Amino acid sequence: MQTYDFVKLQMKRIAKNTTILGIIAALLLTVLLLVPNVPTPGNLYISDAVITSAYELRDLYESRQYFVSANAESFFDTGYYEESDGKPVYNYYAFASDDVFIVCKTSLKLTQESYTDYLVRGQLREASSLEWEVLNHLRSDLADAWEISSYEAFDYISTYIIDVAAPRIVVQLLASLDVLLIVCLLVLIVRSHLNASNYKNIKLYTRLDGGNADGAERVNTAISREFETGEFSFNKNGVRISRSWIIRTSPFGFKVHRKADLIWVYKVTTRHRTNGIPTGKTYSVMLWFTDKTFENLAARSDKLATEFVETIDADCPGIIAGYSDEINALFNSDLAAFIKLAKREEV
C-alpha cells in the first residue's frame, strides 16, 4: 500500500508556512493596535472620556483615553490661528477648567469670538512644536494681563491640546481595517489546515488533470511513486524533475507539468541600469510547455544558468535548448510547428 502522498505533503507544507507567516503578521498587526497613539477600543468606538477637571488630562492621556469631551461654560477664540501658504487653516480656541485653560485646535467653521455652554469634542494629545509656540504666546499674554511672571503663567495653561478638527472616523477605519486583517489571517490559517485535511476537494488538487478529480488522483499517485524514491535528475531552486514530471514548489503553492510537455528551455540574462549606469546582471532559465505556460528559474550566475540549461536538455529529450529570434518567432506564430521541430518530427 502506497503511503507517500505528494499532494497531501505539499498541502501540509503550505498550511505550516501559512500558519507561521499568518501568526507573525497577526502579532504585528496586534502590536499596531496597542501602540501608545491608538486609543482603547471602548474610547474609540463607544464613548468619549468626559473631562471634569483639567488635572485629569495627563491620566486620560496615559490610559489611552484620547477621544474626550467637556462642557465649556465659555469657549473663546484666543486670536491665534495656524496657516498654510499664507491662508488660515485652523483656529485656536480655549476654555477654562479648574483655573487652567485648555487650548483646542478647531476648524475655521467656528467664527464667533466666544460660545456659551459649548460641547467640546476632540482628540486629546500632547502639543506639537508649532502648538507649543501658540501656548507660549498665550502664556505671555496671560502674564501681561494678570501681571504675573511667564513662569507663573505656565501653571495656568495645559500642555495638552484637544484637537477638535481631528477626523475620528479615520482612526476608526484604520483600527477596523487592522482588526479585519487579523481576522482574515486567522481565517486563512484555518482554511489552509482544512485544505490540507480535505485536499481532494480543492481546485489545486483537481487542477492536476484539468479539473477531473479521478484523473487528478491518478496523476497524484504517479507523482507520488516517482517522488517517493527521492531520485531526481534536477533538483534546484524549487524545481524538481523526475522520470515523468516537472514540479515547481513555492512556500504557498506548487505547479505540476508533465515532463513530456516541456518543449523549450533557454537562458535569460537581464542587464540592470540605474540612471543609465550599469549596476549588474541577473540570470534565469525559462522553461516553456506545450500549453504555453512557463516556469522562470532564477540562477545565481551565468555559469549556473548554463549548467541548468545543459542538465535539463540532457534529461528531457524532444526539447529545443537555446534562444534565437527565429525560434521565438516560430513559437509565437505556429506552436504546432514548433512542437514538431522540438520533437524532431517533420514540419
Image (cartoon, rainbow, N blue to C red):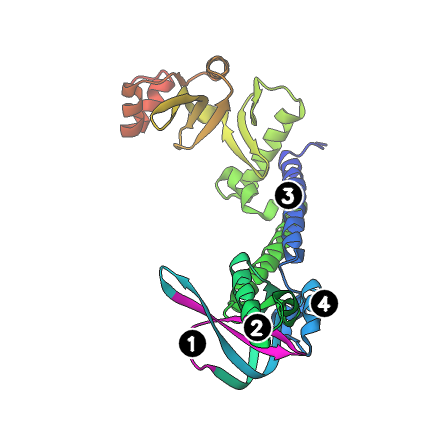
Q: Is residue 202 above or below residue 242?
A: below
The span shown in magenta is 88-113
* Residue type, label 4: Asp
The Cα atoms of the two marked residues, 2 and 4, are separated by: 26 Å
Residue 309 in the image: state x and y as whole percent.
46, 16
Is the Cβ of the residue at disc 1 closer than 8 Å to that at disc 3? Answer: no
Q: Is residue 73 above or below residue 37?
A: below
- Helix, strand or loop status at disc 2: helix
> Magenta includes 101?
yes
Q: Crowdedness of circle 1 by 10 Å Cα count: few (<14), some, many (20+)?
A: few
* Residue type, label 1: Lys
The Cα atoms of the two marked residues, 1 and 3, are separated by: 47 Å
Residue located at (57% from left, 34% from top): 250
Corner quadrant of residue 126: bottom right
Q: Crowdedness of circle 4 by 10 Å Cα count: few (<14), some, many (20+)?
A: few
Q: Which residue is mark 4?
A: 59
Dot placed on the residue nearer the N-terminal end, 1 or 4: 4
- Main SS class of the magenta portion in the image: strand
* Residue type, label 2: Leu
